[in-house]
Amino acid sequence: PYDPAVNRYRLTFALLGLALAAVAISAEVFTPSGQPSYPPEVVESYSPENNSTVLRQIGIEIDLPPNYAIELVVDGVSIPASEIDVTEETGTYRWRPGPTTIIPEWSTGIHTVWVRWDRISGLPDPGEWIWSFRVQ
């Protein structure tokens, strides 16, 4: 026997299932991926700011607690430790392109900085963060 109420329930549950699937797919597609736009807690400060627009004279600076070491990669180029100025007492690391560095100058456009760190002594505390900025 034909029961219209059963068909309405089937249709309702089918539509609810499709709506749930649409929400799940939308959440996956529209959720930002990659690194967060804010630094991890261990990063006390950094420059230039994420997604900022800066002049060509800018240098990169990252400040971690003392007793950390970093690896710095700029636009896919690993920066030699000998080019990074370190103030060990404050945990401040600075690098700027120049005629005697691996990257002689900033080009106009977007640049990506990847920094990885770990504690030098004591318990390990590894981490990494990626951010980018635009040079005018």
Image (cartoon, grey):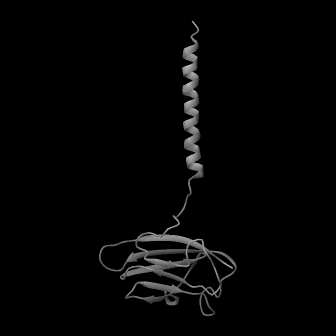
Residue in the picture at 41% in, 81% down: 69
Position of residue 19 relative to residue 7, above or below, is below
Residue that protrudes farthest toward the top in the picture = 1
Which quadrant of the rendered structure holds the N terminus? top right
Question: Within the image, what quadrant is residue 135 found in?
Answer: bottom right
Which quadrant of the rendered structure holds the C terminus? bottom right
Residue in the picture at 39% in, 86% down: 90
**Foreground of the two, 122 or 65:** 65
Question: Within the image, what quadrant is residue 112 found in?
Answer: bottom right
Measured as percent of width and height from the top left, residue 87 is found at: 42, 89
Residue that protrudes farthest toward the left in the picture = 122
Question: Within the image, what quadrant is residue 126 found in?
Answer: bottom left
**Foreground of the two, 18 or 71:** 18
Residue in the picture at 57% in, 87% down: 96
Measured as percent of width and height from the top left, residue 125 is found at: 36, 72
**Foreground of the two, 41 or 128:** 41
Position of residue 1 relative to residue 43, above or below, is above
Residue in the picture at 56% in, 49% down: 28
Could you tell me how many numbered marks the image carries? 0
